Amino acid sequence: MNLMRSALINGCSCRSTWLLSPISVYAARCRGVSGLHRCLTTEAHSAEGQPDEPIEETHKGPKKPTLLKVFDETAPHTGHIKVITLNSPRNKNAISRKLLGELRKQITRSLEELESERTLYKGKRAGVPKDATTRAIVFGSEVDGVFCAGADLKERKNMTEVETQEFLDLLRRTFETLARLYIPTISAVSSIALGGGLELALSTTFRVFTPATLVGLPETRLGIIPGAGGGPRLKNLLGQTRALDLILTGRRIRGDEAFRIGLCDRLCGPTLEDIQSNSIGDDVLRQSAMDGAMEMAREICEGGPATTYPLMRMMKHPNTPAKEAVAYDEVLKTQDRDEALRAFAEKRKPVFQGK
């Protein structure tokens, strides 16, 4: 069992350590992402009257269907990691107006929290109060076999031209807000992410895939082009030629190729051949991607909390030595920096407080 645990923990960084037998051990571990996180009272709701949406039962009767689930997990040192999972199996997590509205609400709330904390403590310290801040955000799916199938085309076909433009404007603003957050964001994509689904993943800082992941921007096959930042972000990530290859052909690529060309940052789980030959389920793959993303988030949060904001701010703007010097000066004055020096001298792990 210790060997199995070691393989699971290292599944993202070393694919060769993946153990397929017994699969049931891993499958049992992977059931129920909610078991890994503490559920917040804040949950996103859609309108009533959607019978195919998941319903949560309480002692007071059924709640409204949930389009998003939002969880917190305590981060190392201080603060928490926010987990936002798409939960619309009826349309394979396609981005409808309701889902987009709830997604924007969560992203905007995270931005407002960060700005409020930075304003409150500006000039006093670079960090924020203990356990009061979101240090990273992980996006995932509650639906087996899909991360996000893109825009809800069934809904789109009934929109007027004005409604379509309003939807696209809100979608672009939402993804732009996400891309501009000064905290690390990670997409856990175990399966399908097409069109707007891939554009959502491209708006996050990092992407964690499995070999079974299938991504693409198929818009040209529908007579349009990517419209929510997918083209520019893909170009910035892969370069113009590779971006044009994927967009003009509309072809879909698996996780292995995505990792090879730099579209994803970590590849988790067994090989595609092992997935197919051992009939590993979508639920296991979904949890594998989520575990990989959470592991990455925790690794990031092991660093000094006060370093994240100035570093992310510096990297998201024109990167010059002068801007790096400003960011360095900001963290140089923190208590966490002094703690790190003491810990190094005492040969122990530092205990950061975001001060």
Image: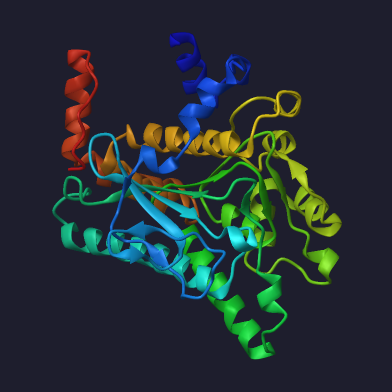
Residue 287 sits above or below residue 152 on the image: above
**Colour mode of the rendering:** rainbow
Residue 38 location, quadrant = top left
Residue 317 or residue 237, whichever sits in front: 237
The residue lying at 24 percent from left, 64 percent from top is: 116
Q: Nearer the viewer, residue 185 or 289?
A: 289
Q: Residue at x 41, y 63 (%)?
A: 107
- Relative to residue 332, is residue 318 drawn left or right? right
Dividing the picture into quadrants, the one containing residue 289 is top right
Residue 260 % position (x, y): 71, 33
Q: Is residue 165 above or below residue 202?
A: below
In which quadrant of the rendered image does the C terminus lie? top left
128 w.r.t. 101: above or below: above
Q: Nearer the viewer, residue 220 or 39?
A: 39
Residue at 45% x, 40% y is 32
Q: Is residue 326 visible?
A: no
Residue sitting nearer the eye, 50 or 312: 50
Measuring 63% from the left and 16% from the top, which residue is drawn there?
A: 16
How many badges with numbers are in the image? Answer: 0
Q: Is residue 233 left or right of residue 349?
A: right
Asked whether, in this view, residue 128 is left or right of residue 4, the answer is left
Pinpoint residue 303: horizontal percent, then vertical percent.
32, 33
- Residue furthest to the left in view is 124
Mark yes or no: residue 257 visible. yes
Rendering coords of residue 207 (x, y %) = 56, 43
Q: Position of residue 4 (x, y in %)?
A: 50, 14
Q: Quadrant for the N terminus, please.
A: top left
